[in-house]
């Protein structure tokens, strides 16, 4: 989509006034808002991808729990005040 904003300089107008008018017109047209919305757009994940990710997470947790049970891994504190 192509939207142009055009501002012509008046006879008694300085550059700062022209820039101010241009900025106001750009804000009013909604171009920046639309571009910022598009910038972080992420497609929705398909059901298959969600399921695959969930199964992978479950398998990883089971493996960690098994290693924890065998004593090969020490339990780490999680959360906000974790020490290293």
Image (spheres, rainbow, N blue to C red):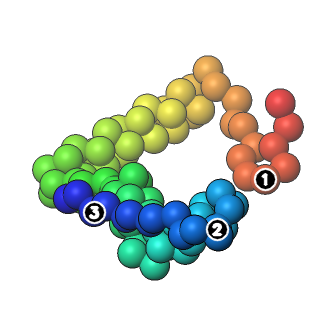
Determine the residue positioned at 81% across, 43% down.
82
Q: Is residue 6 visible?
A: yes
In the rendering, at what x and y percent does residue 50 appear?
24, 52
Q: Which label sits in the foreground, 3 or 1?
A: 3
Give the residue pinned by disc 3: 3
User: Which residue extends farthest bottom?
Assistant: 28
User: Which residue extends farthest top?
Assistant: 72
Cα–Cα gap, marks 3 and 1: 46 Å
Horizontally, residue 68 falls left or right of residue 54, namely right
In the rendering, at what x and y percent does residue 55 appear?
28, 45
Which of marks 2 and 1 precedes in the sequence? 2
Determine the residue positioned at 65% across, 57% down.
15
In the rendering, at what x and y percent does residue 80 appear?
78, 53
Task: Using the image, determine if residue 65 lies above or below residue 81.
Answer: above
Residue 16: which quarter of the image?
bottom right
Query: Disc 1, disc 2: CB below 8 Å?
Result: no
Give the residue pinned by disc 1: 80
> In the rendered image, which quarter contains the N terminus?
bottom left
Task: Using the image, determine if residue 82 lies above or below residue 1.
Answer: above
> In the rendered image, which quarter contains the C terminus?
top right
> Mark 2, residues whose alpha carbon is within 10 Å: few (<14), some, or many (≥20)?
few
Element class at badge 2:
loop
């Amino acid at each position: 989509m192509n939207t142009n904003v055009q501002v012509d300089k008046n006879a008694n107008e300085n550059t700062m006034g022209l820039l101010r008018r241009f900025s106001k017109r750009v804000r009013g047209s909604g171009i920046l808002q639309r571009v910022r919305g598009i910038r972080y757009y992420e497609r929705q994940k398909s059901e298959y991808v969600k399921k695959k990710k969930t199964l992978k997470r479950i398998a990883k947790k089971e493996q960690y729990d098994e290693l924890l049970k065998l004593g090969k891994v020490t339990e780490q504190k999680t959360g906000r005040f974790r020490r290293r």
